[in-house]
Amino acid sequence: MSKGLAQQGREQWKSRTGFMLAAMGSAIGLGNIWKFPYITGEYGGAAFIIVYLICIALIGIPIMLAEFAIGRNTQKDAVGSFQELTPGKPWFITGIFGVISAFLILSFYGVVAGWALSYTTKAMSGDLLAIPPDKLGDHFGGFIGTSLGPILWQLLFMAIVIVIVVKGIKEGIEKWNKILMPALGVLLLILVVRGLTLPGSSEGVAFLFSPDFSALTGEAILVALGHAFFSLSLGMGTMITYGSYVPKNINLPTAATGVSLADTGFALVAGLAIFPALFAFGMDPGAGPGLIFITLPAVFDLMPFGQFFSVLFFLLISVAALTSAISILEVPVAYFMRKFEWTRKKATWILGTIIFLFGIPSSLSLGAWSGFTIFGKGFFDAVDFLASYILLPLGGLLTALFVGWAIGKKKAEEIGGLAAGGFVNKLWIVTLRFIAPVLILIVLLSSTGLLDVILKAIGLKG
Ligand code: PHE
């Protein structure tokens, strides 16, 4: 097949709504309902949220637009798009990093999503609420520390992801997002109303919205930035890949802003569903990754119609995880389909299986293999840290530099879909050239400990 023909036969979204829902489906996921609440709880609430919002506005939205623009302009996958815009240059390595990040992230993402599936069935059967609240921690620890159980749930989750991605853009990804995303909105709405109408919930609202800046540490800022990338699905070519299926007539700036606002709004509203309920029942918001699996079931236990709400909640997480996982798998699938001319079916099954297998050590590291550590972290945490807090910001940094500098100013001003010569267009380019790279670099250097080394070397720190 000639290149032109292959290009003509490439898949596209059926509708604008379909694309928007798919991109929102990618962004809204475990990041919003599992990670955001527990890191907000750990890093002190409202002050952390403000830093997070600044990261979204200053870095997230401009980079999301950059990713959509790269994808739509080239109609290529995460690696091919860089090659198309700068042939013969090493920029495509950014895309390779993206494919690697996708492998890493989906491997542990599938593990947590498997827990959510398992907890959904436990909630349905009534087993979950039959556990005394003070035993919920042991129960969760026992469950994720078992060797076989969590892996089977992860397998089930990955199988669902594969079956949807095999069906392709229109009939698989778009169709399922159109069904699942509205369902997700309804589920969340019911849970928020429940949380906010509990007596004593106002303390939780205050925790989310009245900032105490003294609680803000350097580490908190790193986590906020890393989480902005994770939550908006940026820095690994997801939005490049989804953008590559976008028809020419869709307005990208509106899409990037809309998806970012929806994702942020969803995280805040999920916080409003969770924290008021935690405070209403006197639970600790800083419980860490087990927050929604240990602390929340205790809350459901105490709440009228708790079983009903617990089922809705774990269903919410499972569905949100599914629409995100689909987008992660699509990154390597699109790449392998073009690069090695694999069929969608072959690429999806093979890559999905490898990612599942790679998730097994993550799962085992919470139990049988907990003695094995990398830089003091268990396998699960090491993979999460490397991918979410190093590779994604690095990918975002390279993407910003790519559009800001490498493709030429004229091209950059053209592909974003912002008014030619307009102020916003100039602001976007300046952000990609200077503001985002500098901020990301500072955060990356401090997270890897390199900042300390440099500051000491130039005598700014003792
Ligand atoms: N954004 C997703 C979430 O918040 C996770 C994700 C990360 C998806 C990176 C795609 C790429 O859960």
Image: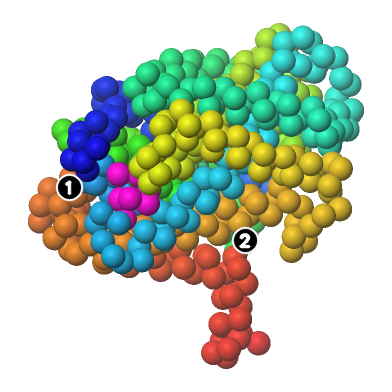
Q: Is residue 393 magenta?
A: no
Where in the figure is residue 150, as x and y percent of width and height? 76, 30
**In the drawing, does residue 78 fall left or right of residue 153?**
left
Residue lying farthest to the front in this orientation: 1
Where in the figure is residue 219, as x and y percent of width and height? 62, 61
**In the drawing, does residue 371 fall left or right of residue 360?**
right
Spatial CA distance of label 1 from label 2 is 35 Å
Residue occupying the point 56% across, 75% down: 451
Where in the figure is residue 437, as x and y percent of width and height? 39, 65
Residue occupying the point 72% across, 11% down: 124
User: Label 1 neighbourhood size at 10 Å, few (<14), some (14-19), many (20+)?
Assistant: some
Residue occupying the point 65% across, 23% down: 156
Residue linked to disc 2: 219
SS at badge 1: loop
**In the drawing, does residue 212 fall left or right of residue 95?**
right
Magenta stretch bounds: 76-82
- Point out which mark residue 418 bears: 1
